Amino acid sequence: MAAVTQRARGPVLGLDLAGSPRRPTGWCVLGARGALRVGVAFSDAELTRRVTAARPALVVVDAPLSLPLGRRTIDDRGGPHLRACDRELLRLGIRFFPLTLGPMRMLTSRGMRLAADWRSLGFEVVEGYPGASQDLAGIPRKGGGLGPLRRGLLRLGLRGDLSHRGLTGDELDAVTIAWVGREHLAGRGWLLGDADEGQMLLPRPLGRAGDFHGRRIGRPSARESRPRAGRRDRRPT
């Protein structure tokens, strides 16, 4: 029990990963009491230094971190295109880009490689999705304006850099998934998909537990442990 409590009090690192190291990756280190620090990073080495410096209890990455069962590689054009967690997003009516779509393959490859590296260093790494998390939390996506998204995150009790200065969309998405990781450590997250294939961590939706617009959503997370037309916020950056 003491080990679980200590883990729950550890920081969470959220990363809004870019597909290319030439583009900014937003990062957020979130403490147990809601105070946070944010910034951007670029290279793989810079991101790894950020992970090791934060020593997080959990790393949440906005990028696909697994392939569909039956697909041997990201470029295997004959394999399945969707994972169980992706099909669950479809059922919920949440917009997203499939991981096999064009430049999303670059983001998926980078995410899987970095997650494997960080896990080999002893860190727990899970996949997140800011757009879906914002939908479930009842706050705007960044496409609706950075001001409304920032105010929505402040209503969740977050502070620190979020209170003192304007943030980029990459940083606000990193804040979002860091908050989801914090919820997970407190036993208030949702893991979508198949554990053998790769799961996606989302927050428990507003309203009746496990319900989102009348649709049931996956099982609660434990402490241990045809995309729709229109704008989608997980972009192959």
Image (cartoon, helix red, strand yellow):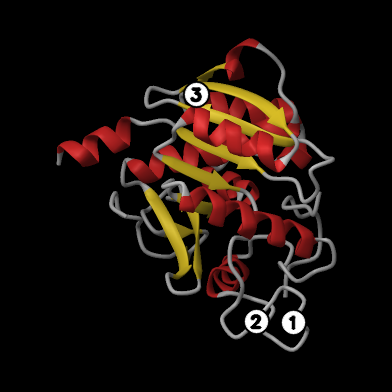
Labels 1 and 2 touching (C-beta < 8 A): yes
Q: Calculate the distance from the C-alpha at mark 3 to the C-alpha at mark 1.
A: 42 Å
Amino acid at dot 2: Arg
Residue 20 numbered tag: none
* Label 2 Cα crowd, 10 Å radius (few <14 / some 14-19 / many 20+): few
Horizontal and vertical percent for residue 123? Answer: 44, 46
The residue sitting at 63% across, 33% down in the picture is 27
How crowded pointer 3 is (Cα within 10 Å; few <14, some 14-19, many 20+) is rated as: many
Of tags 3 and 1, which is closer to the observer? 1
Q: Is residue 106 left or right of residue 180?
A: right
Local secondary structure at mark 1: loop
Label 2's element? loop
Residue drawn at x 55%, y 41% as measured from the top left: 177
Which quadrant would the N terminus be assigned to in this image?
top left
Of circles 3 and 2, which is in front?
A: 2
User: Would you name the residue on which mark 1 appears?
Assistant: 76
Disc 3 designates what residue? 158
Which residue is under mark 2? 72
